[in-house]
Amino acid sequence: MASPNNDKTLITFWGTRGSVSTPGRITEKYGGNTPCVTVCHKDTTVILDAGTGIRNLGIELVQGADTEANPLSLHLFLSHTHWDHIQGLPFFQPAYLENTHLTIYGSHKKERFLASVLKGQMDYDYFPVAMSSLTADISIQEISEEVIQLGPIRIDWQEQVYHPGSSVRYRAHVNGKRIVYATDVELDQLFYGTDADENREFLCREYLGFIQNADLLIADGMYTEEEYPHKTGWGHSSIPVLIEAASRARVKQLAVFHHDPQHSDTFLDDLWVKSRSKHRSEDHRMVVFWAREGLTLSI
Amino acid sequence: MNKNDEKTKIWPVDSARAESQEEGDFGDTTTVEMDRERFTGEVPVALRAYFEIISSDGKNELFELGEREISIGRSPRCDIHLPSESVSRRHARVTFRNEEYFIEDLDSTNGLYVNGIKVEKCVLRNNDQIEIGGEKILFNEERTLQKKDGIAE
């Protein structure tokens, strides 16, 4: 993990793949692990989602660190509790260290409590270690406050309805910069849906307002324009609609995220070449790239 | 033969014949020893990684990467010396960890770019294009079978 030893805010991608992990040679560049991203500023570490990518983050946090003298204090924000966003948690080494403080935040709108959903994936039928055996000091909080202040990082959030079971998008404000994490949402339905949802116009404005002028937007861009019509209602966005929305909101850098498991490195490289020039306008130049496992940016 | 009597004989060679046996009877068995080295005369995969430092005159220079840390910068003391005003004295470093190469910016003035994106740190993959103060470097990685005498195929 690149050490945040100055005023830089570091964003690291530990998992970028959507739906299911995809190990193998054809995915090694963009990565095969499911979503996990960190935002670090000075001593504060915010983790976004606990897909399989969180396993490598855990190793990195523990390896070579004196966790006895310097206990880890971590804040994990879950976009939602579908498998690909929580499956790495039982393999997160710091959760097995007694002196780790781990706070897990997630949506308060679910029918079941967040704690029972997370505990459920560690039932003996699915996993040999029960959640109660995680020795870290773990606190599970269903978010209700509009803003959560964690040292120098302030987090606000909004619900996203265009995903089965809904999801949450988060925005980190740090050092005058804004980093938005908005995955697992079907922007094509939000902006171009044919349903008669009277609330949709409000939701469109709300979304654009949330990502407005973001220094970095990490967002669901799972499908190509050609693929999307076959995936309508699945809760994920097509890349052109994402780029259009981000460009309208004058986002500075867009990380296309939650890659389709079928998209190989070569496919994504070709797609990037085709897509990268489409968002450029005379008065706004947005950097667009495909989120890649093992990449750390400084904002 | 009962499988409990001959625990060391582990697997039937002829699957069609095995299927004809009654359940629990594994018939005549043979253990096949697989020795890759003897079979191929080669030892398994060797990793070769190198930078191709792109030159405007077409005479690109190759720099082989090993397991030790490599520094890149304007200073002549750097392992890869890039004598350009746009390059910081110690601009970036390359480390090898868990069988992967990482490139990392060392608080340079003009930043480190991988495939056109300004990065702080990045794992390197084959054909990654690195840009340091306008100087271009291509990362190449090859996995080859290696002869016993160490000469790569």
Image (spheres, grey):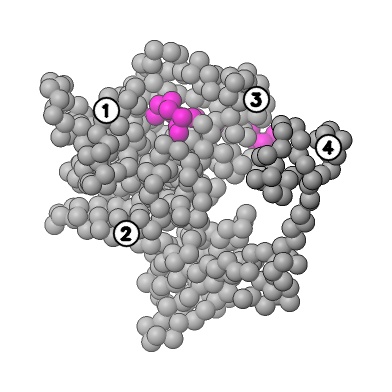
Which of the chains bears the disc numbered 2?
Answer: A
Name which of mark 2 and mark 1 comes first in the sequence: 1
Q: Are marks 1 and 3 in contact (CB under 8 Å)?
A: no
Q: Position of residue A269 (x, y in %)?
A: 35, 58
Camera-near label (4 vs 1) is: 4
Q: Decide which of B19, A200 is in the foreground and name it.
A: B19
Q: Position of residue A229 (x, y in %)?
A: 22, 39
Query: Magenta segment: does it hold B122?
Result: no
Above or below residue B80? Residue B100 is above
Q: Decide which of A51, A37 is in the foreground and name it.
A: A51
Q: Are marks 2 and 1 in contact (CB under 8 Å)?
A: no
Element type at mark 3:
loop
Which of the chains bears the disc numbered 4?
Answer: B
Residue A222 sits in which quadrant? Answer: top left
Residue picked out by circle 3 = A128
Which of the chains bears the disc numbered 3?
Answer: A
Element type at mark 4:
loop
Residue picked out by circle 4 = B1
- Between the residue at mark 3 and the residue at mark 2, the CA separation in whole angstroms equals 42 Å
Residue picked out by circle 1 = A162
Do we see residue A29 in this rendering? yes
User: Looking at the picture, which amino acid does disc 3 mark?
Assistant: Pro
Check the picture and name the quadrant holding the C terminus of chain B: bottom right
User: Looking at the picture, which amino acid does disc 2 mark?
Assistant: Asp
Above or below residue A34? Residue B70 is below
Residue picked out by circle 2 = A270
